[in-house]
Amino acid sequence: MTSLSAQWLDRDRRRLILEQSAIPDTVYGILTAACALFIPALVIAIAVAIFAAAWPAFAKLGLSIVTSSDWDVAGGHFGAAPAVFGTLVSSAIALVIATPLAIGVAIFLSEFSPAWLRQPVGFLVDLLAAIPSVVYGLWGIFVLIPLLREHVMPFFRDTLHLGSTPFFSGAAYGPSMLAAGVILAIMALPYISAVSREVLMAVPRSQREAALALGATRWEMIRDAVVPYARSGIIGGIMLGLGRALGETMAVTMVIGNRPEISASLLAPGYTMASLIANEFSEATNDLHLSALMAVGAALFVITLIVNGIARWLVWSVSRARAK
Amino acid sequence: MRALKVAALMLLTVACARENASNSNTASSTARTSGSVDLTGAGATFPYPIYSKWFSDYAAQKGVKINYQSIGSGGGIRQLSEETVDFGASDSPMSDDEMSKAKGGPVLHIPTVLGADVVTYNVPGVTAPLKLTPEAIAGIFSGSIKKWNDTRIASLNSGVTLPSSDILVVHRSDGSGTTYIFTDYLSTTVPSWKASIGKGKEVKWPVGIGAKGNEGVAGQVKQTPGAIGYVELAYAKQNNLPIAAVRNQAGQFVVASVAGVTAAAAGVAKSLPENTDYRLSIVNAPGADSYPISSFTWLLVYKQQKDAAKGQKLVDFLNWALTEGEQSAASLDYAPLPTDMAAKVKARVATVSLSGAK
């Protein structure tokens, strides 16, 4: 026990020596640089592997893999256009539903909510992101699809008389593009709302006070002073949600009906690129089939890259417009 | 609320099943003192329940540990061809093209147990098993029969009141041996099916929606009035799904059962040439009791074993599986091979060469 103070002294002295030396800084620098380089290297390695595996299919079939609608494994035809269409449409439906909801939640939590409500509601919304996608899929089969089939689809088709438009025509069996869009909306919502909430809360108090001082009502203050300030962050959140929706596999496979056909009707079953790969990969023995599935993966990779590029550009142009 | 309960129950069942599986795994690993794995295999998911029982029983009795990855028949064939596993497993036989690409030389197909597909449906008001002919099944799944009260169904089921509602076809969306057996059956029995759709682990379905796995198809059929689909016999029995009686080659309407499936194999076995490689289809088998939508599932092994010790272990296991293993098949709703056929398959196992390099 007596030596305790001596030990402390010793430790302080050692720490002093360490602080003076350049070694910790160097080691730390190298470590973080390695981490920073490892991730891009991984992305490049994945891209190279996918494109190499997809090459035989591209060489043989060309771009018809993404432009033709004929997917017939036994006949050797691999045209994944319906899956490309389904991926884009289901994600678009998801964003149309999720964006207003998520931004509404974020504005409520950052501007209107009493403090005691903010934490629990925010936590519950974030919790949506933690639910495994197969659970979403099961919920989709047992709760969402019967609900859509019995109530929502007849409402659109018959009560609103939209059945005569191509978008709500045909038989309503349940598994459909609409079901996939709704599931994806719920899955993308927490991402959009969490990011939006954080950027809205980060808007400086002075910004709000200035608007109020100019005589703005609360609504005008939010519309004209808070949301524009946070716009680039909100767009980033939406793109994060879109990325989630584009790549989601399991839950979509369970509710979309897996039918490789392009249909304008939201009530008709569809297909997505991710579910096509998940469905067929494990039983694919034929080399061309495997390569075609890899080519679909490569196309999905490119689509995600384009979407991320658009997001970057949007964020950049919004922040530049504000700087002017 | 009820649906929620069902979903919760399903989750629980999945969790329990996992737990059971992991329990039996630990049981098998503790039975053996050394932790090393003796043989590795990969392939079909359909026979996985019976195979995992066999591997765990075998480890307990003989102390030989076998690691099996149920990654799908396609993956099993690929891994065997690349020689990354000691044996493969598949629900559909390898094609000549696939055989020629296998790096380890000639591949033997060893039939182990039999499986069958059943047609399940959700027709409100119908309680007795529906009777269906191959032509009616092909008509429904190709979209030419669209309503439940179509005369082509009604004429087979006199006395049953069929609704005038639309038929919703539910098929597998994932590549699967189940689809292979089903389309093999329809291609064999209905010429127009063979010409327009053909057979395969995934085909281009003219109508209907795709669902993933037996559980996906069964769930969709249960949820949707007017739906019809096909699932594995074992899955249908364990979940008490309504099953259609299918007309066999002898003109009898047969409800699928373990005995009916074994009868189908016995029906085919009679006319089998002595030098068969067992890459056989037994759909639409002769015999009054034969259930027509049946198939073997195979273990795939190289004829030339490069490692004599491993090869011996593999041969010993195959012989055990074809005698003692067969007896436990029916307890898990798999049909065992007919006894005389099992003896012939053992003679084929005896042709495996342990001499190592060719």
Image (cartoon, rainbow, N blue to C red):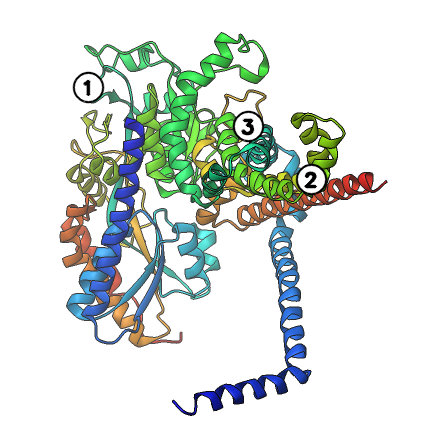
Q: Earlier in the sequence, mark 3 or mark 2?
A: 2
SS category of the residue bearing label 1: loop
Q: Mark 2 points at which residue?
A: A230
SS category of the residue bearing label 3: loop
Q: Which amino acid does label 3 sit on?
A: Glu
Quarter the N terminus of chain B occupies: top left
Q: Distance between the residues labelled 3 and 2?
A: 40 Å
Q: Is residue B55 above or below residue B149?
A: below
Q: Nearer the viewer, mark 2 or mark 1?
A: 2
* Mark number, residue A261: 3
Expressed as whole percent of the image width and height from the top left, the position of residue A144 reads 41, 27
Q: Quadrant of residue A219?
A: top right
Expressed as whole percent of the image width and height from the top left, the position of residue B246 reads 24, 27
- Residue B175 visible in this rendered orientation of the protein: no
SS category of the residue bearing label 2: helix
Q: Which amino acid does label 2 sit on?
A: Ala
Q: Nearer the viewer, mark 3 or mark 2?
A: 2
* Mark number, residue B127: 1
Q: Distance between the residues labelled 1 and 3?
A: 35 Å
Q: Do the residues labelled 2 and 1 touch (CB within 8 Å)?
A: no
